[in-house]
Image (cartoon, rainbow, N blue to C red):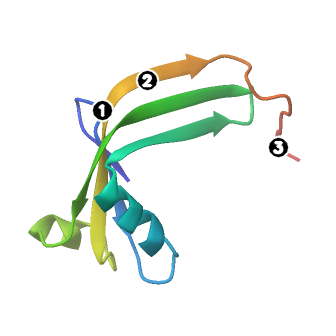
Amino acid sequence: MRVTEDGTLTVPDYAGNRFFNTLGNLLANPRASIAVPDFANGDLLQITGLTELVLDSPEIADFEGAERLWRLTPERVVLRPRALPLLFGAL
């Protein structure tokens, strides 16, 4: 994954990761949201915005083995402190 200065996430897609249906949904409706949990302290980062599929670009070669990329350009970012009821730490 790559994050640019403006916060855009670029995510590689590889054969066999079963994202193909999700990518089709993003073509039909580019609005998306992801949640990034921090299991150490229970915080949750929510990112919502617009996606773009990159199907043919030299940039794909930057991610070894990737077949395509998708991007999420944030429109809203919310940090929810202690939103997770369970915490996980090192064993």
Q: Earlier in the sequence, mark 2 or mark 1?
A: 1
Check disc 1 and report the residue beneath it. Answer: 7
Give the percent coordinates (x, y) of residue 56. Answer: 13, 73
The residue singled out by tag 2 in the image is 77
Residue nearer the viewer, 63 or 78: 78
In the rendered structure, the answer to whether residue 11 lies left or right of residue 16 reads left
Q: Are marks 2 and 1 in contact (CB under 8 Å)?
A: yes
Q: Splitting the image into 4 quarters, where does residue 41 fall? A: top right
Q: Are marks 1 and 3 in contact (CB under 8 Å)?
A: no
Secondary structure beneath disc 2? strand
Q: CA distance from mark 1 to mark 3?
A: 29 Å
Q: CA distance from mark 2 to mark 1?
A: 10 Å
Q: Position of residue 55 (x, y in %)?
A: 20, 71
Q: Quadrant of residue 86?
A: top right
- Give the label on residue 90, or none: 3
| Amino acid on which the number 3 mark rests in the picture | Ala
Q: Which corner quadrant holds the N terminus?
A: bottom left
